[in-house]
Image (spheres, rainbow, N blue to C red):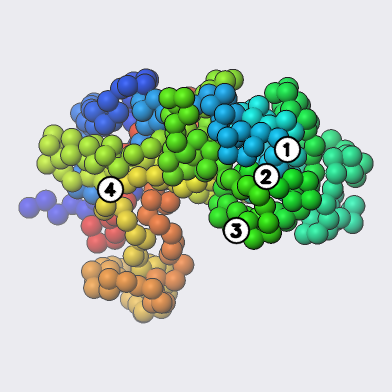
Amino acid sequence: MDTKERRVGTCSRGIRCPIIREGDDIAKIVADSVLEAAECEGFALRDRDVIAVTESVVARAQGNYATVDDVAADVKAKLGGETIGVIFPILSRNRFAICLRGIAKGAKKIVLMLSYPSDEVGNELVSLDKIDAAGVNPYSDVLTEAKYRELFGVNRHEFTGVDYVQYYGDLIREMGAEAEIIFANHAKTILDYTDCVLTCDIHTRARTKRILKAAGAKAVCGLDDIMNAPVNGSGCNEKYGLLGSNKSTEEKIKLFPRDCKPVVEDVQKRILDATGKHVEVMVYGDGAFKDPQGKIWELADPVVSPAYTDGLVGTPNELKLKYLADNDYKDLSGEALKQAISASIRAKEGDLKGNMASQGTTPRQLTDLIGSLCDLTSGSGDKGTPVVLVQGYFDNYTN
């Protein structure tokens, strides 16, 4: 009998795929690409492996696109087409600028209200040090564009080199709308300028809408309410609208994929039929992690994973090995320590919440953790691996 131990735990592999085009059978391409990689690289698939597919190729295969004109028509229909307050957008050429083109095209005037000193996901407009030096209180002070320039001058994004105040203002005007830019952190401030509001925050949108409606706004939409149904035959996303969208071309937006559950279940079935192994499958977008240098929280999508198979529901249920080694079994070493810890893992309860031996483990959703691993593995550039295979994620010390 082979008693050799496995010496590798979790392994994440980027899987190369063909370039995905609209109308492609995404589930077949994903399953075939994983099976071909396994054969080529000489590894076997196992039960509870995770196959993750980036949202962008799913949306591309679905043809889930909208144009700037589609966005303009939807904005005008829902917010009146006159003066619209556009509040709390993130600072992004890829994510928001293309949306702003459509929004501005659907209005006569945009009052753009930027949160400061940074946007929702940490992109900095001005440093906290400069805020302190100027004696400004970002919790209460409302700044005009002229006051912002007087106090802080030109501030370019650390990574992109873009002055987003100038960039967004110019973009609005280029689309034929008047632009007024203010800086404030309370949603109700915008009602001093207009009662038709498009709130563009991602993770705080429900609260912002509630505050605006309670304060008497005439019309309130979030980005999730724009393009949540087809416009002139366009794509859409019923749940998230423009949230999770990306620039495709100067006139076209790729929306977050829709109806992804059948896709992940199809991939799962194809792998089961081909190998007899029951894998889990998920669609992932942005990972949920924060950059310590730029202070940017990566998650500009509404969720890390819009769809996943049922085996990925929940959170990890793990014991902290170093806690057991330093406390329960501090007098043991070598094989005795290994056997004692292995016995504890095998005997662990179904839910370790409140157990000191689980303190310091990561209390996050499995899909958020695995999606973050996959986002880092696939990258956002030219790696050409929109599918990631994660093996051994559900292993522990006893496997």
Residue at which label 4 appears: 309
345 and 287: which is toward the camera = 287
For label 2, count other residues whose C-alpha is less than 10 Å away and answer few (under 14), some (14-19) or many (20+): many
Residue at which label 3 appears: 210
18 left or right of 382?
Answer: left
Q: Amino acid at mark 1?
A: Thr
Mark 3, secondary structure of its residue:
helix
For label 3, count other residues whose C-alpha is less than 10 Å away and answer few (under 14), some (14-19) or many (20+): few
Q: In the image, which is nearer the foreground, mark 2 or mark 3?
A: 2
Mark 1, secondary structure of its residue:
strand
Tell me the quarter of the picture where residue 384 sits. top left
For label 4, count other residues whose C-alpha is less than 10 Å away and answer few (under 14), some (14-19) or many (20+): many
Q: In the image, which is nearer the foreground, mark 1 or mark 4?
A: 1
Nearest to N terminus: mark 3 or mark 1: 1
Distance, label 3 to label 4, CA atoms, is 33 Å
Distance, label 1 to label 4, CA atoms, is 44 Å
Distance, label 1 to label 2, CA atoms, is 7 Å
Distance, label 4 to label 2, CA atoms, is 40 Å
Q: Amino acid at mark 3?
A: Arg
For label 1, count other residues whose C-alpha is less than 10 Å away and answer few (under 14), some (14-19) or many (20+): many
| Residue shown at 78% from the left, 46% from the top | 193
| Residue shown at 57% from the left, 29% from the top | 73
Mark 2, secondary structure of its residue:
strand
| Residue shown at 43% from the left, 51% from the top | 368
208 and 261: which is toward the camera = 208
Mark 1–mark 2 CB contact (< 8 Å): yes
Mark 4, secondary structure of its residue:
loop
Residue 213 x, y percent position in the rendering: 63, 56
Q: Amino acid at mark 2?
A: Cys
Residue at which label 1 appears: 83
Q: In the image, which is nearer the foreground, mark 3 or mark 4?
A: 3
Residue 54 x, y percent position in the rendering: 40, 35
